[in-house]
Image: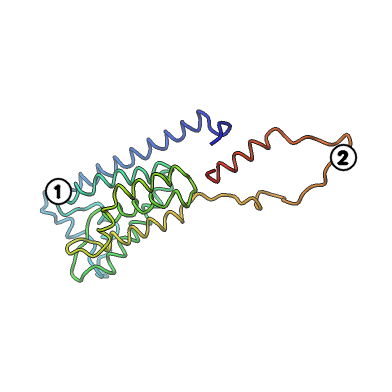
Amino acid sequence: MSSENVGPADAEAVIAEALKAFWVMVGFLAIIWLVQIVNWADDYRLSLDYGIHARDLGDVTGLVTAPFLHLSWAHIEGNSGPLFIFGFLAAFRGVKRFLGLTALIVVVSGVGAWLTAGPHTVTAGASGVVFGYFGYVIVRGFFDRHRIDIAVGLVMALCFAYQFSVLLPHKGISWQGHLFGFVAGIAGGWIFRERRVRSGERGNTRPLPAPTGAAAQTPTPGSRADLLKELDDLGL
């Protein structure tokens, strides 16, 4: 990345977005832990009443509420760490895009569990969202063509490789929600990728006649900076 394109303002913008991502995830965790306290005090009736009831056409509210509910202290403890890590990494490039990604993951993961979970089962927990963020973090760098994000994705995939085993059928575990959440995260990497203007769409691309005589001019000083910026946009 050339020094001509990065300055104090750019660094401040990145830090500001990272702080937003941090507080968004702190707020998300605070909400699910407060809900957990109420849920535990009520003998987990909230999870049973507002979880995802497989193929129950009369109760689809769980598609939205299930990620905020858990079935035990061990359940929420196991989700909280990965949720914060993957959520922060998914959000620090832009909170607005992150919120759209979250909505996509919640819907796809919830619908997938609702359609494919065993009959008379109730699914609750944020693990579908966790796997959605996990999938998104792994692929985002490839779609956005950011080398740093590619490296982060590969490191996360290696460090949390054991998570892939939970995408396979396990008794008593909503592997369906995990799998559909993971697929939604990968799809989100494509849907919410950074749009780049193609060189042919930057305006009139037909060459202009070369000026002659006294009207001839040398290339503008900014042409080199523009070229470096394009290369930086391509991740080179």
Query: Helix or strand or loop: what does disc 2 sit on?
Result: loop
Percent across and percent down for residue 18 are: 39, 37
Percent across and percent down for residue 100 are: 41, 52
Query: Helix or strand or loop: what does disc 1 sit on?
Result: helix
Estimate how packed mark 1 is, as few (under 14), some (14 to 19) or many (20 or more) residues with alpha carbons within 10 Å.
few
Percent across and percent down for residue 143 are: 47, 52
In the image: residue 151, left or right of residue 56 = right
Q: Earlier in the sequence, mark 1 or mark 2?
A: 1
Residue bearing mark 2: 212
Estimate how packed mark 2 is, as few (under 14), some (14 to 19) or many (20 or more) residues with alpha carbons within 10 Å.
few
In the image: residue 145, left or right of residue 103 = right
- Label number found at residue 16: none
Q: Which part of the image, by quadrant, shows the C terminus?
A: top right
Residue bearing mark 1: 73
Label 1 – label 2 distance at C-alpha: 79 Å
Q: Say if mark 1 contacts mark 2, CB within 8 Å.
A: no
Residue found at x 34% / y 38%: 22
Amino acid type indicated by mark 1: Trp
Q: Residue furthest right?
A: 213
Amino acid type indicated by mark 2: Thr
**How many marks can you see?**
2
- Taking depth in this image into account, of 22 and 146 the one nearest to the observer is 146
What sort of colour scheme is used for the picture?
rainbow
| Above or below for 117 versus 227 | below
- Taking depth in this image into account, of 41 and 113 the one nearest to the observer is 113
| Above or below for 34 versus 106 | above
User: In the image, which is nearer the foreground, mark 1 or mark 2?
Assistant: 2
Q: Residue furthest top?
A: 8
Residue found at x 44% / y 48%: 141
Percent across and percent down for residue 133 are: 34, 51
